[in-house]
Amino acid sequence: MPDGPLRIPGFRLLVAGQLASMLGDCCYAVALPWLVLGGRGGTALLGTVLACYGVARAATIPLGGVLADRWGGRRIMLGADVVRAAAVAALAAASAAGAPGALALVLPALLLGVGSGLFLPASYTLLPALLPAGQLGRGNALSTMANQLGGVLGPSFGGLLVALWGSTPALLVDAGSFALSAAVLVGLRPGRTAERTEGAAPGGEGSGFAEVLRRGRLLHVVMVVALVCNLAFNGTMEVALPDWAHRDLGPADYGALLTVLGIGSLAGSAIAARARPARQPARLFAALAAVMGLGLAGVPYAGGVVGAGACIAVYSVASGWQNIVAVTMLQTWTPARLLGRVMSMVMLAVTGSFPVSVALAGLAVHRLGPAPFFPAAGTVIALTVALALAQPAFRRHRHGEVFGAGSERAGARGTA
């Protein structure tokens, strides 16, 4: 019999659905560029399609949090999966009929972005309904590992499908994965917590959310950390790393570094799955940030692809572990009826920083070259979390403390 969260049938179903969905997403990630670039479109059209997806996702994340709190995360996730399955199936049909035009590419991208924006915050409300608080950290880690495993295996599977039979079968696999995820959600029977919150009347919840936004010092700190650290990370990985690899390495080495990044994140989640919940999670969070900063800073100075891979491995293991610590800390701190909206704010800080980060990185790397960007980004990450640790509400937070139980106000009144 599986141990811990895997003893719960609903959790096992959820993880299996997530793995299938991620494998499908990776098939889409390979099929879409080949479909666009192999038809009448070019890089401009591909960029437009991806931008439509990104804007739609960012715009609907706050709405996803509100709907998840009002009607329950499982229902919103189910609706989002149904919409995304239909959108990708329509794109597959257009692909089978010939090279699709701009409208046939943009409309599914918009629907996929809306579905993703609704799904993301809702997904963070489901695990606390399935698992007891003591198993939440391991559950988050195992759930993240399923997604990361799909991210490691999926691109090769999708590339093989596209190479052998073209984009249409890969798109059909993605549509099928969304349908499978929806079927899992239909069969899922959340515990009493979810039954009590799903469909509950929303009266009075707006003032509660306003109070969390106004007085939730822990949330303020985590949102600032998420925003600043993702500003540093996204530009480094999306602009500085490929530019450095293009100058000093080669495409195969670059692909190997990305593989190390994915495997390291998976390993970090595995460590989090085996570790006990930290009594003072903020201190563990800060220690991992220091390791992340050191690993990132050394990438271009560690002696070629092997040294760079070692630095990226150090960074990604610490980052994978740290993500689980942060998510679990917020899930246990946030009142259940407000969890969707609170997580949507954090997700907005994470995803909304992407376009700004890559634009700024493009300018900085063009002027200074890629190598200095790595220690600068590593320093920003480490210093940001060090400053966060100076905040009593963050530093003194204990595992299991909930907003409104007195700990937040007591921490705010205490001395540093």
Image: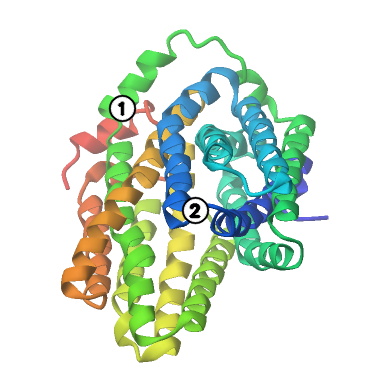
Residue contact between numbered discs 1 and 2, judged by CB atoms under 8 Å: no
The residue nearer to you, when weighing 339 against 380, is 380
Classify mark 2: helix, strand or loop: helix
Look at mark 1 in the image and give the residue it sits on: 213
Residue at the spot x=47%, y=28% of the render? 65
Residue matched to label 2: 324
Q: Position of residue 290 (x, y in %)?
A: 31, 67
Estimate how packed mark 1 is, as few (under 14), some (14 to 19) or many (20 or more) residues with alpha carbons within 10 Å. some
| Element class at badge 1 | helix
The residue type indicated by label 2 comes to Ile
Question: Which color scheme did the rendering employ for the protein?
Answer: rainbow
The type of residue carrying mark 1 is: Leu
Q: Residue furthest bottom?
A: 303
Q: Would residue 335 be seen by someone viewing this image from the given angle?
A: no
Query: Measured from the top left, where is residue 352 in percent x and y?
Result: 35, 43
Position of 410 relative to 26 (above/below): above
Taking the spot 57% from the left edge, 49% from the top edge, the residue there is 140
221 or 312, nearer to the observer: 312
In the displayed structure image, the side of residue 246 where residue 331 appears, left or right: right
x and y, in percent, of residue 341 in the image = 44, 28
For this rendering, which residue is in front, 401 or 255?
255
Measured along the vertical axis of the image, is residue 130 above or below residue 336? below
Q: Is residue 51 above or below residue 312?
A: above
Query: Left or right: where does residue 325 sit relative to residue 159?
Result: left
Considering only order in the chain, which callout, 2 or 1, is on the residue closer to the N terminus? 1
